[in-house]
Image (spheres, helix red, strand yellow):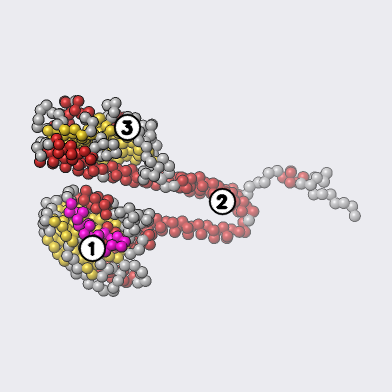
């Protein structure tokens, strides 16, 4: 038999036909899949990028607010010794020896002030009669000292004076009471640069701190960067500081949400591009495997649905952003998450307007931690709000809430809840407790925990009865409700924690915001393992 010519052209060259066919023509299915994949990938990448930027801005705002709170918390540490020195001077007739003895431990390197001086404000010419540390720069400017201490300083408050144009810039702090002014100074770096240590809680931020409400270079106190004003993504906050105010501007040194989320849009684009090409080729060459691809798409849809469900659960578990404002009543609240790093927990509070100049306070704690506890908390919280809108009596709210949890069946949690209905005009509080600790009532005569009957927690019994107690309160009283994370400590009986809370609250309660902030700061320790909610309510008259 003769040889058969090889497939191809007349010359019998292998692959000649393929060469004449030219490049592979994409099929309509391939083009459609490629275009669709490109659009979806671009949309997902853009969406991821937008979400990333929004989340970074939200985290930056939170970090800036945290820095502002830390700064504002320094006011008592500066004001208290100055106010005490002023009271001592007023009591001793401005004794220089007593003043120096009192202020000496507070002045010097690494201490509260670099210098301190005593000024009799009723004696002219105005000049310090006692100085601890270097003589203050203000003493060399009689007119400025007179204007600041006699006219510009607000009595009974921490007053701030910027000494920023001097070769050795600094800040002056003055407290005027009685016939004396206590003036202290602190030095600032000459170049206004401040480095945050790597182990500092704010080491991931660049910041600039200004005196007053502007960002003028002349008002700069400290900054961690050389290029000002700070540009790019940033957060700005005005921090009340005694009788003055500071402006804090921060930006992030690195992605606050993590490097992974900053790279996520590019990862989505890369992975999406690879998937798009693979899907296009598979569509063109393996169309018969379409059903498998549809199953994969269904799995992806399920993953997206699960992610959406988690986001909705967290959203419903959020605490109220605003509290009601009623004439004659001041309300303040704090939520402190557990130090273990869990962002969501089972503690919650609500303060709602119940009509007829009444306010309903609800504070509770769902057993457990983590996402499940937060989800359960959101369910119980919204159920309580719904029942309160129908009947705001504390006993009725707790009874219906217990029935709601019991009827659901199959639950493995319980919740302690305290309800308090406050009648502003009658000055009465009606309370009912489902296993929750009694609130603390502060009056002009002292403070003590209210006598309220403690009944079974929500979810423990089928048809419990919740007893109500009605108590009258004097003018100017303050009610402090809290969850157990504020007073419980490992290896310590609860009575010790309750006594600690009462003693701290009775130490010069002052403004409600200061009281709640101090309780949160000093009782929520760095190693606490439980979430904490605090609500303060104060009658203004």
Q: Does the stretch in magenta take in 174?
A: no
Quadrant position of residue 206: top left
Percent coordinates x, y for residue 391 in the rendering: 21, 64
Q: How many numbered circles are shown?
A: 3
Please name the residue shown 87% across and 51% down the image: 3
Residue mark closest to the camera, 2 vs 1? 1
Residue picked out by circle 3: 189
Q: Whole-percent x and y of residue 255?
A: 43, 44
Residue sitting at x 24%, y 50%: 518
Res 363 quadrant in image: bottom left
From what the image shows, is residue 388 above or below residue 62?
below
Q: Residues within 10 Å of mark 1 (few under 14, many from 20)?
A: few
In this rendering, the answer to whether 271 lies above or below 134 is below
**Disc nearest the viewer among 2 and 3:** 3
Q: Residue at x 38, y 59 (%)?
A: 371
Q: Is residue 485 left or right of residue 286?
A: left
Going from N to C along the chain, the mark reached first, 3 or 1, is 3
Q: Position of residue 431 (x, y in %)?
A: 19, 64
Mark 2 or mark 1, earlier in chain: 2
Residue 275's disc is: 2
Quarter that holds the N terminus: bottom right
Q: Is residue 60 visible?
A: no
Structural distance between the alpha carbons of marks 2 and 3:
56 Å
Q: Is disc 3 surrounded by few (<14), some (14 to 19) or many (20+) residues within 10 Å?
A: few
What residue is shown with label 1? 495
Q: Is residue 194 left or right of residue 473?
A: right
**Element under disc 1:** helix
Q: Earlier in the sequence, mark 2 or mark 3?
A: 3
The stretch in magenta equals 487-507
Secondary structure, mark 2, is: helix
Measure how far apart labels 3 and 1 are at the Cα level: 48 Å
């Amino acid at each position: 038999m003769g040889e058969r010519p090889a497939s191809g052209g007349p010359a019998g060259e292998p692959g000649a036909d393929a060469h004449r066919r030219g490049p592979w023509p994409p099929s309509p299915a391939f083009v459609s899949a490629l275009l669709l994949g490109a659009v979806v990938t671009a949309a997902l990448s853009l969406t991821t990028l937008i979400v990333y930027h929004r989340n970074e801005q939200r985290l930056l705002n939170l970090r800036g607010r945290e820095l502002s709170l830390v700064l504002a918390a320094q006011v008592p540490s500066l004001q208290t010794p100055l106010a005490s020195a002023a009271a001592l001077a007023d009591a001793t007739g401005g004794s220089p020896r007593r003043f120096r003895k009192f202020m000496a431990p507070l002045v010097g390197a690494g201490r509260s002030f670099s210098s301190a001086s005593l000024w009799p404000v009723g004696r002219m010419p105005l000049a310090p009669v006692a100085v601890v540390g270097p003589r203050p720069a203000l003493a060399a400017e009689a007119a400025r000292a007179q204007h600041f201490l006699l006219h510009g300083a607000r009595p009974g408050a921490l007053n701030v004076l910027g000494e920023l144009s001097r070769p050795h810039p600094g800040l002056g702090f003055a407290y005027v009471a009685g016939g004396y002014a206590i003036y202290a100074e602190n030095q600032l770096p000459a170049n206004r640069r401040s480095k945050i240590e790597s182990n500092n809680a704010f080491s991931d931020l660049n910041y600039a701190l200004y005196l007053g409400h502007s960002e003028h270079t002349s008002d700069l106190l400290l900054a961690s960067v050389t290029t000002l004003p700070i540009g790019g993504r940033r957060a700005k906050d005005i921090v009340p500081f005694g009788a003055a105010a500071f402006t804090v501007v921060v930006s992030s040194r690195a992605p606050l949400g993590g490097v992974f989320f900053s790279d996520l849009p590019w990862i989505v684009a890369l992975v999406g591009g690879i998937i798009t090409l693979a899907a296009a080729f598979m569509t063109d060459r393996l169309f018969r495997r379409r059903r498998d691809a549809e199953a994969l798409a269904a799995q992806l849809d399920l993953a997206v649905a699960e992610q959406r469900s988690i986001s909705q659960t967290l959203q419903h578990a959020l605490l109220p952003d605003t509290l009601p404002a009623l004439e004659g009543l001041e309300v303040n609240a704090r939520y402190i998450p557990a130090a273990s790093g869990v962002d969501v927990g089972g503690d919650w509070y609500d303060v709602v307007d119940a009509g007829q100049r009444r306010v309903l306070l609800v504070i509770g704690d769902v057993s457990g931690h983590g996402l499940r506890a937060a989800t359960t908390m959101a369910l119980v919280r919204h159920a309580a709000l719904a029942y309160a809108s129908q009947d705001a009596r504390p006993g009725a709210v707790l009874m219906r809430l217990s029935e709601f949890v019991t009827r659901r069946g199959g639950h493995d949690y319980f919740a302690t809840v305290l309800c308090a209905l406050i009648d502003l005009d009658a000055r009465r509080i009606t309370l009912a407790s489902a296993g929750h600790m009694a609130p603390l009532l502060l009056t002009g005569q002292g403070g003590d925990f209210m006598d309220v009957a403690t009944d079974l927690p929500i979810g423990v019994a089928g048809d419990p009865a919740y007893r109500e107690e009605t108590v009258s309160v004097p003018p100017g009283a303050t009610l402090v409700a809290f969850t157990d994370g504020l007073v419980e400590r490992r290896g310590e009986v609860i009575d010790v924690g309750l006594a600690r809370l009462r003693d701290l609250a009775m130490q010069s309660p002052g403004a409600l915001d200061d009281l709640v902030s101090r309780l949160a700061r000093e009782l929520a320790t760095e190693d606490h393992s439980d979430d904490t909610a605090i609500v303060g309510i104060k009658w203004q008259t």
